[in-house]
Image (cartoon, helix red, strand yellow):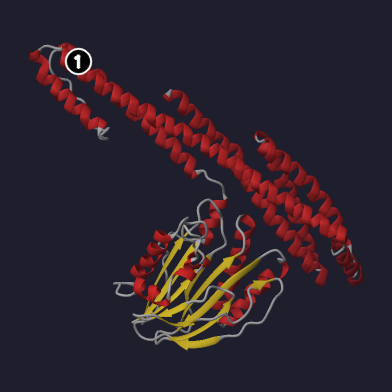
Amino acid sequence: MVSTRLSTVSANGRTITAEVQPSVAAANDVTANILEIEFTASRFALDGSAQDRADNKTADVATRRALSTLTSASSGDVATNSASKTATNDYDQWYTTVIAPLLDAKTLTDRRSARDIQTTPASIALTDTLRSDLTRLQSNLYTWRDAETASTRTSLEILRIALITSLIIIVLLVFVLWLGLRRWVTQPLIDIAADLREVTHGELKHRIQSTGPAEIAQTAQDAEAMRQRLVNEIDEAVAAREALDQRGPVVAALRRELQSRVNASTLTIPGLETAGLLLPAEGVLAGDWFSTLVLADGRLAVVMVDVSGHGPLAGLIALKLKYAMTACLEAGGSPRAVLEAGAHVLSGESERFATAVVITMTGSGEVAWANAGHVEPLIIDRHTVTQRLTKTGPILSALGGQWSMDKTRLPSDSLLLITSDGLSESRDIDNVELSDAWSDETFAELTANKDSVRGSIESLAAAARERAGRWRIDDLTIVGIRRS
């Protein structure tokens, strides 16, 4: 049984490495290159740049290559392979009908005419069909990956039970021998039993010593040989599981770029203490992220963004927002300018939106902020919430908008608490949201009288988790800033 299950784990690992992982990588390449095709085509329509045309052609070649790779790699899964072939056909029709006429245009008038073609119902239908194909393809890939992972976990669990059963049989065998042998061999058997108990209690590295008459010594040697075989098989099983974990889909790399570890590190400046906490949702790639920066003039800046939806497309949009918004801050942009930079990223994304809040602070407590539909940050003293950093404009979306910037002051020994909707919208077993259940005094009680800002936000997260009926169904992000 042990050998059979080890073979199953090994086979599943090869499937994930040789088929699932390359398929996921190719699917992500397809998504990224299609975004590049739409972007360069839009720019070409405006200025007719030869470089944009060349970049578009390069992205088209890369997309077709990735689709070919995906079709080949996914041959082991019927649903994914069928979705890949459908996406290949629909992409070819979409590119030929919607994109190619624009790139072939020679004059501004021709480009305008080609641009008009892109807005016809037929072109829009082709675009929607392609996006639907990509969504279905991603769903099939995740289903395939999850099935292979579940099979491996089942095999590992059966292997664990088999190993435990083997150890129990060893103990029973030794006990029967102890009852049946003559008294003069009792002590050697006691010694062997003691060694075996060490092994069954989890000390698998404990050596079983050979003592007493030849027959008993031989028994001890056999038990030691079996222990060594079991240890070797356990090591092989652990190695197979770790290899499987280390060969997860490349989507994990995108998640690492957006989301740091749970106790996320933060920057600070004299006069302020900061801490961050990020608890990713289970089994999804979301677009939540935050960053802390120390600006050239010595101020501290904090950005928190929540992109709608999940999956690679949401992750790509979140990554674009992160680069654009942090670059604007580092270049000296105001909180309002940072939101405008984020809105520019979403100007061509009709199906995506994001909430965001940008805050800058000095060590003396001067606060400036702009809030694009995000959960309102709280200023909390030892007793209650004293102020909310209210919304100053609409959410970030393709519709655009205008944002204002407000200012306030963070009093000494007060905490500025910035959270995502993963906290405020968490629900208890009665389906009551946290924002409706907790009063201002509750927030103050949970965050006050802690030795550090980290202690305050961890206390808040622990209390939210305790009341939640389901936990980690959405990313939970918390940043705290206390003025000394």
Q: What x and y, as percent, mark residue 463?
A: 38, 64
Left-right relation of 383 to 348: left
Give the residue type that dot 1 points to. Leu
Q: Quadrant of the N terminus?
A: top left
Q: Secondary structure at mark 1?
A: helix
Q: What x and y, as percent, mark residue 397?
A: 67, 71
The answer to whether residue 18 is above or below residue 45 is above
Left-right relation of 285 to 461: right
Residue identified by numbered label 1: 177
Left-right relation of 267 to 339: left
Q: What x and y, as percent, mark residue 144?
A: 61, 40
The picture quadrant where one finds residue 31 is bottom right
Q: Residue at x 60, y 57 (%)?
A: 310
Q: Quadrant of the C terminus?
A: bottom left
The picture quadrant where one finds residue 145 is top right
Q: Residue at x 39, y 80 (%)?
A: 384
Q: Residues within 10 Å of mark 1 (few under 14, many from 20)?
A: some
The answer to whether residue 74 is above or below residue 365 is above
The answer to whether residue 478 is above or below residue 67 is below
| Residue 438 appears in the picture as rendered | yes
Q: Residue at x 42, y 77 (%)?
A: 440
Q: Quick one: 230 or 147, which is closer to the camera?
A: 147
Q: What x and y, as percent, mark residue 280?
A: 49, 58
> Furthest residue to the left?
184
